Image: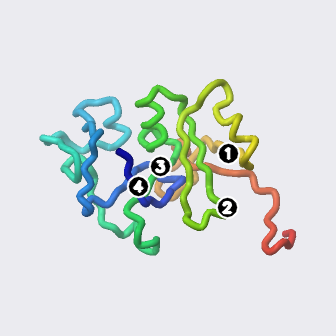
Amino acid sequence: MSQIFNLAIDLAGENFWYDCETHYNSSSYIPIECGSKICPDVACIGCNGPFKPGCTNNIYPANDSPLNGLPKITKGIIGLARSNISLPTQLALKNKLPPMFSLCLPSSNKQGFTNLLVGSIGKDPFQELYKFVQSTPLIVNPVSTGVVSVQGGPSMEYFINVKTIKPESQRS
């Protein structure tokens, strides 16, 4: 059964955040076990079960202030950062796919929908797509410049090389 999730995209965010007030109940939920290798990555604070799907004591609750200013239908945020706990990385690991994704941003789609492709098929994962879309290569910065990151730690952000900006067809 498929479901629609109205989410904001955070290219520098690590977490998948969803408004639990909607009482969403995951059918594929698996708790992170105490002592798991992933615990340091997600900053596990303690082990006090029993764990179950939904908003429980092992899922970080948050108020809905990150949604302020976004369309009212937005019920969460999907983080796509280069981190071990971001959704694309978790999907790739779970399905034994290469840790890569493609995000197709709509140019004229009035509905605002987008496609997120995770993993690859064959040697060049998106070769067929290149015939139909324009792409921008990403630059990896080995040292973080983010405000909330650890100073000098590895970067989770994405960068692009900007050569010119043309507001209203003016070259600057």
Q: Nearer the viewer, mark 2 or mark 1?
A: 2
Q: Of helix, strand and loop, which one carries label 4?
A: loop
Dot 2, crowdedness within 10 Å: few (<14), some or many (≥20)? few
Front-most of residues 169 and 122: 122
Indicate the quadrant containing the N terminus: top left, top right, bottom left or bottom right.
top left
Task: Name the residue type under label 1.
Answer: Leu
User: Seen in the image, is 134 located left or right of residue 125?
Assistant: right
Label 3 or label 4, whichever comes before in sequence order: 4
Task: Name the residue type under label 4.
Answer: Ile
Residue 55 in picture, x, y percent from top left:
22, 53
- When the figure is inspected, residue 9 is found, relative to residue 120, above or below; the finding is below
Q: Are marks 2 and 4 in contact (CB under 8 Å)?
A: no
C-alpha separation, residue under disc 3 versus residue under disc 4 = 34 Å
Front-most of residues 48 and 119: 119
Dot 4, crowdedness within 10 Å: few (<14), some or many (≥20)? few
Label 2 or label 3, whichever comes before in sequence order: 2
Indicate the quadrant containing the C terminus: top left, top right, bottom left or bottom right.
bottom right
According to the picture, the residue beneath numbered tag 3 turns out to be 150
Label 2 or label 4, whichever comes before in sequence order: 4
